[in-house]
Each structure stands twice: as C-alpha cells, then as structure tokens.
Image (spheres, rainbow, N blue to C red):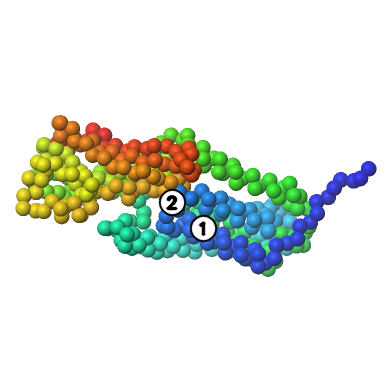
Amino acid sequence: MSGPAHATPTRPAPRTVRCALVMATLAVTALLASALPLHGFGILVALALAALDLLLLDATGWLAFRRSPSLDERQRSLRDLAHRRGFRLAMVAIVLMWVVWFATAIAVTIATATTSTYSIPASSSVDNGIPGRIVLALAELLLMLPTLVIAWRADGGAVGDGFEGDQWSDPRRRWTPWLLLPVLAATWLAANAWLPLQSAPYAALSESSGGPPNTACREFGGGTMVGSEFGATVGLRANVCWDGTDAYVLGYRNLPIPTEALRNFGASAPQNWILMSLSACGVDNTADFAAISQTVCTERIDTAGTLHYSVTARVSPLPFGIAARTVSVDLVVTRNGRVLEQP
C-alpha cells in the first residue's frame, strides 16, 4: 500500500509578478475611489479586485493573516513589519483617495460641460452617504496593505524558508478561497433583484430657489435605491413653484409652464428661467453597480392645480434586462405649496 500523498510545494511567484499584482491592485482601488462613472460595471471591478487580492494572498502564502505558532522567527518578523508599515501607509492612502476623488470629480464635471448645456456634477446630490465603491476601496486598503507590503519585498514570496510543504501548499486550501467570487456575485445579484427598495435622502434643500413674481418656490429632491449602496439610485430633483392657481416645475426645458404662470413673468423672459436649469432629469442617478436606462420625467397638473411629478427609470444589474426593476420616484405638491407626497 502506498503512503498518503503529500502536496507538492509550489514555486514562489517572482518578485516582478508580485510587484505587477500590487500595481494592478492599487490601480483598481484608485478606480473605485475615483469619481469616474462605472456605468453599472462596478461589480466587475469589485470582482477583479477580489481576484487580484486572492492572487496576492496566494503569492505571499497568506502570511499577513497567519498565526504566530505556524511561523518561524523570520516569518513572524516579516509579518509584524508588514502590519506596522501597512498601518502607517493606510493614513497616507486615505489622503490620496480623497485627492483622487477630488481631481476626478473636477475632470468629470468639466468634461460634461462639453457635451451638455450645463456641467453635471460628478457626485449626485441624492444619496449623499458613503458610496459602496468608496466602502470597498477603504476595506481594500485596511485589509490588504500588509499583504501589499509583503508582496513588494524581495523576500515576500510564498515559498521560502519554512513555507514549503505546509498546509498552505495543499491545492484544496489554495483553490477554496476562489469560491468567494461566485458567492459575492450571487449575493450582489440577489440584493439587486429582491432587496426592498430604500429611500435616498437629498444632500441639500432650499426653501426658495427663485421664481417669477407673485410665486413661491422650493427645491425638492430625493430618490430610490435598488440594491442599497451596491446597486443604483434613481434620483429626483425639481424646483417647484406655486402661485395659488397651479403648482409646476420650473427650469426643466422639456416641461411647459402653465399659462397663468407665464402671465406672472410679466416683462421677464420665460426662456431665461428655463435656461437656468433649476430642475434636471436623470443627473442625480447613480449607476455604479447597476445600469439605469429609460429615465423619463413627467409632469401632470390636475384640475385643482396640484402638481404630480414623477421620475421613472429601469434599473438592470445584468445585461439584456435580466433581473431588471422599474423604479418610480413621485412628488405631489398642491397649488398652495402643500406637499402631499415626496421622496
């Protein structure tokens, strides 16, 4: 009878390979931390980052997460050094994350000015909490910086003194962590398909946003999130005015102004108010982890002068509309400014 099979020791990943993985990991993390639009492909970026992490962990023998009893003196020294340096680098990395976001936000805002009648801010005014992409970038830095330090060093390979032939060389232990990728993808898909919709707050509201004479106006905003911070947000932003006869949206060129409201403008040119773009349709949508399409903003003023304003969009986490959901955000304001429904 043959004895038990022993795992064949794996050769260490060359330092050039490990350094390339470190640079790729930092680049993907910077993409997540930036304001560059992901157009619904955020989950692919997150899975790519997770795959890079697993490659780095395998290349370093998971040294940053191993317990002291299983390590020799050299390995413990390297692990402890990586944690100390990783802690110091974390502070610098967080500052650099803010710089990356600020620079890319300016670039995106300027770029949209060349394709639109007005600049669209890179960050939405709706759902102004910490975006899911920033949460992932922060978690990446806090958890993986020690491993990045180890991988960058010349002596950071998985197979070195004391690494050969141990439990971490077992192929089953090496490949089991890769099951994390389909689990993450399935969890994300389930959250976007079945998680209850959540309301998203507006960053800032003003009681008066300007308007024609003899009217009162207010800026309204809000939205609905699909899949929480790891899906998409359909946003609503509208400058609503009322004059005792009608309530209506002002500043969105695709919506007509009521006849009575036009009379209130007097000598001022109604077109000037429209061009101010006080209201906008779709600019507050956030589509990092799921695509948003078919955004339609509609206005209906009933016989009582009450405004019924609605933003409807299709949120699709997968191509071809698979697991897509139709989301509506509604606003109802009476002719005297009473709010009956808002996001």
Tell me the quarter of the picture where residue 258 sits.
top left
State the image coordinates of residue 175 (x, y, percent, origin top left): 69, 48
Q: Secondary structure at mark 2?
A: loop
Q: Tell me, for residue 185, which label it has, or none.
A: none
Locate the C terminus by quadrant: top left
User: Which of 27 and 328 lies nearest the eye of the viewer?
Assistant: 328
State the image coordinates of residue 4 (x, y, percent, origin top left): 86, 45
**Which residue was labeled with disc 2?**
39
**Which residue was labeled with disc 1?**
29
User: Which of 116 and 93 lies nearest the eye of the viewer?
Assistant: 116
Residue 107 in sight: yes
Q: Residue at horizontal 69%, vertical 52%? A: 67
Up/down of 155 relative to 330, above or below: below
Numbered disc total: 2
- Dot 2 alpha-carbon crowd within 10 angstroms: few under 14, some 14 to 19, many 20 or more: some
Measured in 3D between alpha carbons, the distance from the residue under mark 1 to the one under mark 2, in whole angstroms, is 17 Å
First in sequence: mark 1 or mark 2?
A: 1
Q: Mark 2: which amino acid? A: His
Locate the N terminus by quadrant: top right
